[in-house]
Image: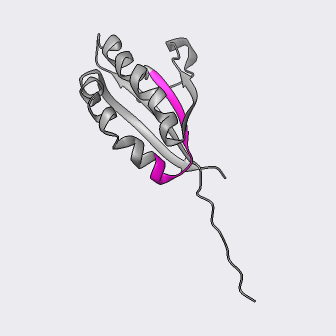
Amino acid sequence: MITFIIKEPKMIYITQLIFLKQGKEKIFLEFEKFAIPLMKKYNGKMIYRLRPDKNSYVSSTAGHPYEIHFISFTSEEDLNAFMNDDSRLSFIHLKEESIKSTILVKGVKM
C-alpha cells in the first residue's frame, strides 16, 4: 500500500508596524491605494489595518507607528510573487519616499 501525503501550503501571517517620514502621509497613502488591492491577485488579504492615536499605547520604547497592518497570504510563494510584482515595483518609489522604517514580523498560525 502506498500512502501519499499532500502538504497544503501554510498560511503566512505578517504584522507590520509602519513609521512614516514627517509630512509624507499622502505619499504613503498613494502607495497603499495601489498595493493593498494588488494583494488579492496573489491570495493576500489585509485582515487589520490600524491607525492608532498616541492615547492607544500603554507603553512604547520604539515610538508610535503611523499604521499597523496584519496581513495574510496563502503561501510563501504568493507573498514572494506579490513582493516582486512588476506593477508594485513601479510604485515602490512612493513607499521608499514616505516610510522611515518598518518592523515586520512573519509567522504561521499555531
Residue 86 horizontal/vertical position (percent): 30, 38
Instruction: Identify which residue, 3 or 67, lies in the foreground.
Output: 3
Residue shown at 29% from the left, 14% from the top: 24
Q: Nearer the viewer, residue 104 or 83?
A: 83
User: Left or right: 11 with respect to 31?
Assistant: right
Snapshot quadrant of residue 45? top right
Instruction: Indicate left or right for 104 with 91 as reference.
Output: right
Q: Residue at 59% across / 55% down in the picture?
A: 10
- Residue found 67% across the figure and 73% down from its top: 5
Vertical side of 57 occupied by 103: above or below? below
Rendering colour mode: one colour
Total marks in image:
0
Q: Quadrant of the N terminus?
A: bottom right
Q: Which residues are magenta?
A: 67-78
**Residue ranking furthest to the bottom:** 1
Q: Between residues 94 and 62, which one lies in front from this camera angle?
A: 94
Residue 63 at least partly seen: no
The residue at the point 51 percent across, 17 percent down is: 51
Using the image, determine if residue 20 lies above or below residue 105.
above
Instruction: Report x, y in % for residue 104.
Output: 43, 40
Residue 94 painted magenta: no
68 is within the stretch colored magenta: yes
Is residue 59 visible to us here?
A: yes
Q: Position of residue 28 (x, y in %)?
A: 35, 19
Which image quadrant for residue 7?
A: bottom right
Looking at the image, residue 19 lies above or below residue 27: below
Q: Nearer the viewer, residue 77 or 58?
A: 77
Picture coordinates of residue 87, whole percent (x, y): 32, 33
